[in-house]
Amino acid sequence: MENNTNTTTKPIIIAMNDFKQNIVKAINDSQMPMAIVNMLLKDIIMQCDQLEKQELEVTMQQYNKQQTESEDKNEN
């Protein structure tokens, strides 16, 4: 495997579109009834909401810690 240091990051709009297309393909390939797909997607959304809240909490804790450390440096 080559280590390519000249990789370009996809713009978020393209990454989002690719992600949506992958989900649509997975749904179509599953051949499940839409009622089941809907139920599964609702479950996934609930899990995503929980993860988003956890990420926000961790980020806020890190930010507050950085702010406190910055204030401590400025006081000295």
Image (cartoon, helix red, strand yellow):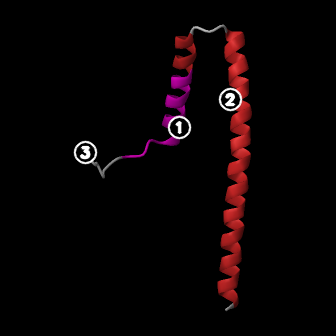
Query: Which numbered disc flags the more N-terminal residue, 3 or 2?
Result: 3
The residue labelled by disc 1 is: 13
- Mark 1 or 3: the one toward you: 3
Is residue 13 shown in magenta?
Answer: yes
Distance Cα–Cα, label 1 vs label 2: 22 Å
The residue labelled by disc 2 is: 44
| Location of residue 16 in the rendering, given as x and y in whole percent from the top left corner | 54, 34
Position of 30 with respect to 36 (left or right) is left
| Location of residue 73 in the rendering, given as x and y in whole percent from the top left corner | 65, 85
Is residue 20 shown in magenta?
Answer: yes
The residue positioned 62% from the left and 9% from the top of the image is 32
The residue labelled by disc 3 is: 2
Q: Amino acid at mark 1?
A: Ile
Query: Which numbered disc flags the more N-terminal residue, 1 or 2?
Result: 1
Question: Which portion, as a residue range, is magenta?
Answer: 8-23
Other-residue count near label 2 (Cα within 10 Å), few / some / many at <14 / 14–19 / ≥20: few
